[in-house]
Image: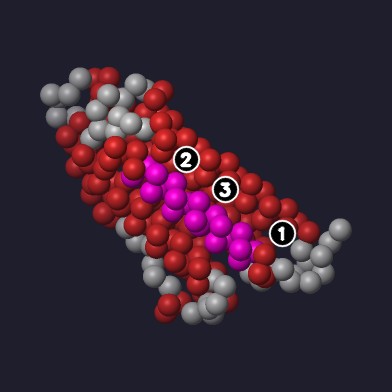
Amino acid sequence: MINLLPRATVFFDLFEGLAKCVVASAEELRRLASQFPDIEAPTRQIRRYEHEADDLTHRALDLLDRTFITPLDREDIHTLVGGMDDIVDAIDALAKRFTLYHVTDMEPAFQKQAEVLVAATQALSSAVGLLRTTRKLSKFSEIRLENVGDDNNHAAIDRLFRGDIDTLTVVRWKEMYDRIEMAIDACEDVGNTLERIMLKNG
């Protein structure tokens, strides 16, 4: 049945629920990095948040299909919820690889990147929270931490390829660094979506 009335409150509840999953997943990845090799609990928690994010995404898209009048542009809603779900998926895929790849040591540079990711997700969550009450771009705190993440990533990759680290370790950590940078970049993508929403509706 098609709903002919706006469902603004429900949409914003779902947006904010997804944003909380994004932040919580990033915080668990930071915990994984800080307490390595004791990673079972944070890995399990990240998996739980991934399932929760999937459920919220499906609910949001189902609501979008059934709602005639939406509080934001339909395409923007689809992009926003999909983008946040992608971040949680990326964090989950990354966390799994510590076990799959039999990682034995934690890289300090990865811990730095985990901190950057947490900061990016927190900025994203704050911006998502604004959608309920304002569309003023001046109140939007831009999510622009990709340069910090890029610098950290370049320094880490440079160290890996200096020639004094065994090849298997290089292969493992090259993918780990690439994947966490992808998660940071995905936060920027969601930030761009939020900026576009505020420009359209401000």
Instruction: Return the disc, 2 or 1, that comes first in the chain's sequence.
Output: 2
Question: Which residue is farthest right?
Answer: 1
Circle on res. 64: 1
Quadrant where the C terminus lies?
bottom right
Instruction: Tell me the amino acid under the disc marked 3.
Output: Ala
Quadrant where the N terminus lies?
bottom right
Which residue is painted at 46% across and 56% down in the image? 189
Query: Eyeballing the image, is 34 above or below 19?
Result: above
> For numbered disc 1, what is the local secondary structure?
helix
Q: Which residues are magenta?
A: 11-30
Rounded to the nearest whole Å, what is the CA distance between mark 2 and mark 1? 28 Å
> For numbered disc 3, what is the local secondary structure?
helix
CB contact under 8 Å: marks 2 and 3: no
Q: Main secondary structure of the magenta part?
A: helix
Query: Eyeballing the image, is 9 above or below 185?
Result: below
Q: In the rendered view, does 71 fall on the left or right side of 175?
A: right
Instruction: Return the disc, 2 or 3, that comes first in the chain's sequence.
Output: 2
Circle on res. 53: 3
Q: In the rendered view, does 99 fall on the left or right side of 112?
A: right
